[in-house]
Structure formats: structure tokens, C-alpha cells
Amino acid sequence: MKKSIKLLFFLFLACILLVACSGGDSDTSSNKEDGSKDSKNSDDKIVLKFAAQNDNTPATQAAIDAFNESQEKYQVEWVEMTNDSAQMHDQLLTSLSSGSDEYDILSLDVVWAGEFAGAGYLEPIDVMMNEAGLNKDDFNAGSMASGNYKGKQYTLPFFPDLGLLYYRSDIVSDEDAEKLQNGNYTYEDLLAMSEKYMGEGGTTTGFVYQSGQYEGLTVNLTEFTNSFEDIQGGLETLYQFTKSNATPEDILTYTEGEAHTAFEQGLAVFERNWPYALGRITAQEDGVEISADQVGIAPLPNGGAVGGWLLGINSKSKNIEGAWEFVQFLAGPEGQKIMATKGGYLPGYNALLEDEEVVQSNALLASEAFQKALSTTIARPVSPEYSKISDSIQIATHKYLSTGEGLEDTVSQIEAAVNE
């Protein structure tokens, strides 16, 4: 009798286990008879992880949503990173250096591309671009140059930033303003104008820019030397500005903050800065004493150094094909239009510069002078050792500008750093 009870108990237990392992009613299972999953179930899409900084506009999420809605095979999930550039760099570097595939697509500061490409962390995209019919000329020139390492392209633009010349349109003559807006002037011309107009309209100085010993000096030297094509000429010209009465006595301490403060308080006729500076004036931030209708913008003589962010693919991703689908979408006309119209970001896809909706989304884009500036951007050095190179450039340049001595040695040091 006891044996019969035990046998019945084990039979009952076996039935329970069999039902549990079968997953219940076959109608609720997403598996087909051949073991494959139902492609109509959105949960079955291949998930791609996009490591990108936080966005206080709806643009990034809207672009991701648009891509996901267009896809039957892939779904992008945004891994929101810190907006602290240095911390984000270190977080990405820790992951990539371990050979991790936790991120498929990467948002990269323009100066990181050479470092990550040189270390083998990024997948080259030249072949994929060719197969997709994409040309480098379709995209912002400076951004593309920033992502080109040893002849191979590793990135497409996410959103560019660039150096601009601001000037007091209520002070500068129409004739000189036209030269500025057309980009038909040199740094020597700018120095002459700075000296000419200084003191008018309540100003106390002619030109303010970034010349402290920090990254901003590397950026400005990039512009003065035309991306290091003429190092000696650029240094000599920058020294002329340093010693001129048309620049502040403490110009060698100036960062973006000091420059925009001097200009927006009505003290300077000309300012070199990024697009955000106009936003401060337009929004009448605290301390702003001039209005937007007193300000004109122009391209810099040799082109503005590009800033902003790029899109790259983790070379260890298990879904390179899918990552490329998202990169070309986000960097292409549809993704870039969403970023521009919903977030006010500058488009890195050149054809959108003539798109009416995009132009209306950003007051800067309505300016022909700004569009010229955006189409003539230049890149800082692209290298796996960018931080080291930039430090060398800053130290050598600042020392020369402080003393006016050792020009040849300074040129040699910068040449060695750039060619390292």
C-alpha cells in the first residue's frame, strides 16, 4: 500500500514538472514549431546600446524613437551618460579597454576619435559608407576630418560646434561688415579693424579670444595656423595680437568666459567664441548689456575649429551591421533633421543647411555668414595621444606669447607634437 502511494505521488510530481517545463498553453508561447521567434514581436528585435550624453531637449530620444519605429530588426536603447566630458571619456575608456561589447554605438567628443581609433576601439566605416552611397562631402568637413585617422574614416557627425567671429554691427562699417561676412579678410585685417574701432560705442578693447594655457589656446592656434599648415605665420600673427593695444593686457589668461563677458558687457568690438555666446545675448542672461540686434557674426579667416560630437561604432560590438544602420540614420538627413528641429542642434549633414524647417529651427542658420562658417570648419590634430599633444602645444605657445622669444624652437616643438 505504501509503495502504491509513493508511486502515485511521484507520478503526480512528474506531471507538475512536465507542465511547468512546457511553458503552459502553446497559444501563449512566442516560439514557432521550428524553434524560431515570431518576428512581429517587438521584444524579439536585436537590441543596440547607444552610449550618449544626457540631452535636456527631446531631440535624442525622438531620433531614437524614429529609428526604432522604422525598424523590424533592430531596436536602440539609449544608455544615458554624464554630461561631464572628462568623466564620460573615462567611463567609455574603461569599458572599451576591457574589450567589452556593452555599448554598440558611441557618442564621442571630436578630440576622442583619434585616441579611440588608434587603440582599435572603433570600427572603420569607409567600406560601409561606400556601400551606402555616402560621400565625405555630404557631411560637415571639420567633423569628418576629426574622425579620420591614418586615412580611414571612423565616425560621422552627431552634432558639430564651431568657432565664430562676433562683431558689433552698430560700430563696424557696412563695408567692413561685408568683408567679414564673406570671409574675405585676414587676421591682419582683423587686427587693423580692432585697432580702428576700439573705443567707439563705449568699448574699451578691440578683440577678445581664448589665450590662456588650456585647451582653448590649442583651438585658437589651430585657427591662426589654418590647422597647423603655417605654424610660424600663425604664431607670429597671434603674438601681434597679444602685444597690440587692441587686446586686453591680460589676454593670456582669457578663456571663453572672460571673452563672452567682455563682449556682452559692451567692452569689446570683436570676439572669437562658440555659438553659445550668441544664445546668452539673445536670452539676455545676467550681465548682458548689449542686444542681439547689435551683434553680427562671421566666419574666421582660416575657418573655425570644429567642436561638438561624433558617432562611432564599438569594434567589439556583436551587431556591427545594426550599429551602422543606426549611425547612418542618426547622421543622415532624417536623424539630423530631428536633432535640429527638436533640439536646436547644428546639422552635420550639409544638405539640411538649405532645408526650410531646419533653418527656421535655429536663428544662426538663417545667416549666410554662419552657413559659410559651418561649411569651412577645420579640425584640431587627430591622434591617439591628443591630450598629450594639446598640452605640448599649449605650453610651447603660451611661453612664446608671454616672452616673444624662441620662435624657431616653439615651431619645432609644435611640429613635433602635431606629427607625433
Image (cartoon, grey):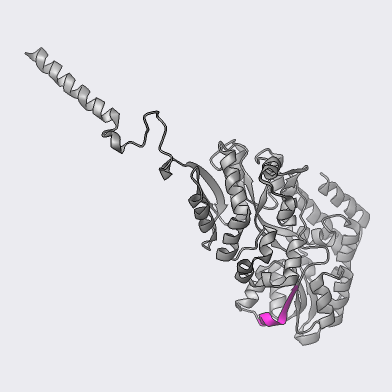
Q: Is residue 292 magenta?
A: yes
Which residue is pictured at 87% across the width and 61% down the height?
A: 234
Res. 182 image quadrant: bottom right
Q: Is residue 242 magenta?
A: no
Front-most of residues 290 and 145: 145
Q: Position of residue 17 (x, y in %)?
A: 24, 26
Front-most of residues 82 and 69: 69
Res. 372 image quadrant: bottom right
Which residue is pictured at 62% across the width and 43% down the height?
A: 313
Q: Position of residue 398 (x, y in %)?
A: 82, 60
Q: Position of residue 315 (x, y in %)?
A: 63, 38
Front-most of residues 205 and 39: 39
Q: Is residue 25 visible?
A: yes
Which residue is pictured at 6% across the width and 13% down the height?
A: 1
Which residue is pictured at 86% across the width and 78% down the height?
A: 195
Front-most of residues 408 and 99: 99
Above or below, comparing residue 4 to residue 153 in the picture: above
Quadrant occupied by the C terminus:
top right
Q: Position of residue 387 (x, y in %)?
A: 72, 49
Q: Residue furthest bottom?
A: 201
Q: Which residues are magenta?
A: 289-297
Residue 303 placement, left or right of 92: right
